[in-house]
Image (cartoon, grey):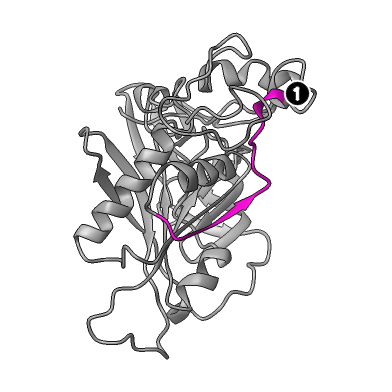
């Protein structure tokens, strides 16, 4: 299948599978829980309302226990009965705003000009107390996840709700390189960080503008860490956005090489796959000016 039973190998100790017995296994498939049956190779979804699980599942008396969230619930420790998907919360659920003020994410798939499919989660504006002006399309915020080989999840996000309850839509883009869509999709970002991610986010905005969902003159982008890199590269290479929030961005890649001191052994040579070996790789300045001039190859845009 075009999915992954697991997640990004950023740290040790992650548990994406747990044995149920009888050739059956609880697995996290692209972040959601399912039961894999060895006898026929089927994968059956379990508790589909919990759309994102932490990489720490365990089995207790045939039930699956872990940390999970959904479109209307924040992360909590839960126990799920695999036979009928019954969910029991083992920790108190967080107090959240009334459901009428919460935007339920819609999974969409968009197409780039080159024909690549890009998945994203669209959180439209939602506030029962406000009626938008006739004929006016809402502003939107593009969320670029970190990693960059991470992914978004269709869960309740109070950061997003802050915007959607105030008339600003949010679209969380799983640009090329995101985990959860198979090896080929992950490898679209190889040596293309700052290129593919930027283009995919812009393509999603163009598609939403073309269908009339958003106002193309009022679009912003935000991201932190690797998402901050994507936001910064977007602001300097495309004309899609009018504003950006660039949080703790990775701009000078020299500190993230093996000798730079800003990463750890488990991410050793991570950048070799994202931009190429550094500093041996020659600069690529033909596409656009770099975000930073600390080295010739600091940002490959």
Q: Name the residue: 42% across, 37% down.
A: 197
Q: State the image coordinates of residue 57 (x, y, percent, origin top left).
A: 60, 39
Residue 248 painted magenta: yes
Looking at the image, residue 217 lies above or below residue 145: below
Taking depth in this image into account, of 94 and 105 the one nearest to the observer is 105
Residues shaded magenta:
241-254
**Figure check: 196 above or below 74:** above
- The correct choice, above or below, for 258 with respect to 147 in the image is above
Mark 1: give few (<14), some (14-19) or many (20+) Cα within 10 Å. Answer: few
Quarter of the figure that contains the N terminus: top left
The residue that label 1 is drawn on is: 264
Up-down relation of residue 271 to residue 103 (above or below)? above
The number of numbered discs placed on residues in the rendered structure image is 1
Quadrant in which residue 141 is drawn: bottom left
Q: Residue at x 52, y 31 (%)?
A: 7
Q: Horizontal and vertical percent for residue 62? A: 54, 40
Coordinates of residue 277 in the picture (x, y in percent): 58, 12
Identity of the residue furthest to the top in this view: 280
Asked if the stretch drawn in magenta spans residue 156, the answer is no
Residue 107 drawn at (x, y percent) = 33, 53
Q: Give the residue drawn at x 20%, y 34%.
A: 115
Check disc 1 and report its element: helix, strand or loop: loop
Would residue 193 appear left or right of 90 to someone viewing this image?
left
């Amino acid at each position: 299948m075009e999915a992954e039973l697991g997640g990004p190998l950023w740290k040790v100790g992650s548990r994406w599978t747990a044995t149920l017995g009888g050739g059956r296994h609880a697995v996290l498939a692209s972040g959601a829980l399912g039961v894999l049956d060895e006898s026929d190779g089927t994968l059956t979804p379990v508790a589909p309302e919990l759309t994102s699980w932490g990489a720490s599942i365990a089995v207790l008396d045939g039930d699956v226990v872990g940390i999970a969230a959904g479109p209307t619930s924040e992360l909590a420790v839960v126990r799920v009965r695999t036979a009928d998907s019954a969910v029991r919360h083992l920790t108190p659920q967080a107090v959240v705003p009334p459901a009428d003020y919460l935007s339920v994410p819609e999974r969409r798939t968009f197409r780039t000009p080159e024909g690549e499919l890009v998945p994203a989660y669209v959180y439209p504006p939602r506030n029962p107390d406000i009626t938008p002006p006739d004929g006016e399309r809402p502003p939107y915020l593009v969320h670029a996840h970190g990693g960059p080989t991470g992914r978004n999840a269709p869960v309740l996000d109070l950061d997003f709700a802050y915007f959607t309850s105030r008339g600003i839509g949010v679209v969380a883009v799983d640009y090329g390189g995101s985990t959860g869509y198979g090896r080929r999709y992950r490898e679209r970002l190889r040596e293309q960080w700052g290129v593919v991610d930027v283009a995919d986010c812009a393509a999603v905005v163009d598609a939403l503008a073309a269908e009339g969902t958003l106002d193309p003159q009022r679009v912003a982008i935000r991201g932190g860490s690797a998402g901050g890199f994507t936001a910064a590269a977007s602001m300097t290479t495309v004309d899609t956005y009018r504003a950006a929030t660039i949080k703790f961005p990775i701009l000078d890649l020299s500190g993230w090489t093996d000798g730079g001191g800003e990463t750890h052994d488990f991410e050793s040579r991570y950048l070799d796959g994202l931009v190429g070996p550094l500093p041996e790789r020659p600069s690529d300045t033909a596409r656009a000016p770099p975000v930073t001039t600390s080295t010739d190859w600091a940002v490959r845009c």
